[in-house]
Image: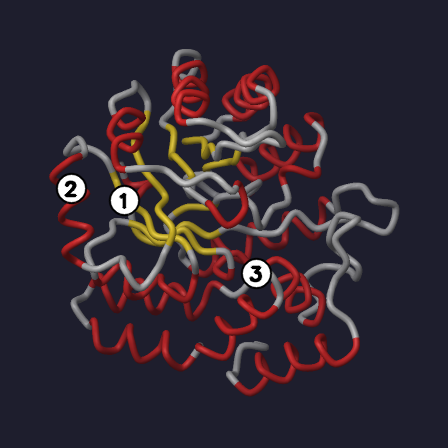
């Protein structure tokens, strides 16, 4: 499926001063992604702060994304701590006309493999659109095994697995996964510092956090790999290493991306949901200095 190939860009869900969703800024972000030529748009992922939004806010964001995506496929996150809530937001997303949904196993209590398989069984039973599995142990504190990948991939509507990027994501590992999973299943890489390497190793898609705010360089890397210029993609990713390093320094990409979007005037400050606080002082200045030095402020 085309939605599970190429670059999927994950935009912020910016908030206004009163804590409501800044719809005008969100629409601007979506339109920016359309203009940049991304392959799909994925609001309400981790970068989109879905876990901090109400059902009504999530439904509204899904509708706005579809309305302003100009035909670009939209995939929205439907994760929640209770299966009942996952099914509710999935229903809203489908009513909004999304092309696919993305589901991470979110929980307060530690989940077992049986819990996670049961979650995907319950949700896929009710879906009419494809689903991407979001394996994000850094956030969920749950790690998929290969056996669980196989069990979940056998369920109806499961069309992609978003696997965490790492130095172990080699072409041999991708080939190993291909052999154990259904042939129709797409493999997507996450973790922006590993995007170029993951695509070059044979992943079908790059699920990119920074691509939702700075789509230009991420589109360029994706197109370089697709055209066979693996060296060029690796070189551009290496050039952006100071940015990737910032993500590690600040407990993930969200605070860094929020700072960048605020600095570029794409969203108002502060744009992140409390209790998450944006970067300030020397940390904020460092982010701005790095994106300026890298030529990412246009």
Tell me the quadrant of the picture where the N terminus can be found. Answer: top left
Q: Residue 163 appears at what percent x and percent y?
A: 35, 46
8 up-or-down from 253: above or below:
above
Q: Is residue 103 left or right of residue 185?
A: right
Q: Residue 2 appears at what percent x and percent y?
A: 28, 41
The quadrant where residue 282 appears: bottom right
| Scheme by which the image is coloured | secondary structure
The quadrant where residue 258 appears: bottom right
Q: Residue 222 appears at what percent x and percent y?
A: 31, 62
Q: Helix or strand or loop: what does disc 3 sit on?
A: loop
Q: Residue at x 51, y 42 (%)?
A: 141
Q: Which residue is mark 3?
A: 253
259 up-or-down from 54: above or below:
below
Q: Helix or strand or loop: what does disc 2 sit on?
A: helix
Mark 3 and mark 1 lie on one chain; the one further toward the N terminus is 1
47 up-or-down from 230: above or below:
above
Q: Are marks 3 and 2 in contact (CB under 8 Å)?
A: no
Q: Which residue is mark 2?
A: 178
């Amino acid at each position: 499926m085309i939605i599970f190939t190429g670059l999927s860009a994950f935009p912020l869900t910016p908030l206004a001063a009163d804590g409501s969703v800044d719809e005008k800024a969100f629409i601007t972000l979506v339109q920016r992604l359309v203009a940049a030529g991304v392959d799909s748009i994925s609001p309400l992922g981790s970068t989109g702060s879905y876990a901090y939004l109400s059902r009504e806010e999530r439904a509204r964001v899904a509708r706005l994304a579809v309305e302003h995506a100009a035909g670009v496929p939209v995939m929205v996150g439907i994760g929640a701590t209770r299966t009942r809530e996952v099914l509710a937001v999935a229903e809203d997303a489908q009513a909004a006309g999304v092309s696919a949904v993305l589901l991470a196993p979110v929980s307060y209590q530690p989940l077992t493999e049986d819990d996670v398989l049961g979650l995907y069984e319950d949700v896929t039973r009710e879906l009419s659109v494809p689903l991407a599995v979001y394996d994000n142990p850094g956030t969920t504190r749950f790690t998929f095994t290969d056996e669980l990948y196989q069990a979940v991939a056998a369920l109806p509507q499961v069309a992609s697995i978003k696997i965490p990027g790492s130095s172990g994501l080699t072409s041999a590992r991708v080939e190993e996964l291909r052999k154990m999973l259904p042939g129709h299943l797409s493999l997507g890489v996450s973790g922006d510092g590993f995007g170029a390497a993951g695509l070059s190793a044979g992943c079908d898609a790059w699920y990119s956090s920074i691509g939702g705010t700075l789509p230009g360089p991420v589109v360029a890397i994706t197109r370089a790999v697709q055209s066979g210029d693996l060296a060029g993609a690796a070189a551009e990713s290496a050039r952006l290493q100071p940015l990737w390093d910032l993500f590690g320094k600040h407990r993930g990409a969200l605070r860094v991306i929020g700072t960048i979007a605020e600095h570029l005037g794409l969203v108002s400050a502060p744009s992140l949901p409390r209790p998450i606080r944006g970067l300030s002082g020397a940390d904020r200045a460092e982010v701005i200095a790095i994106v300026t030095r890298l030529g990412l402020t246009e």
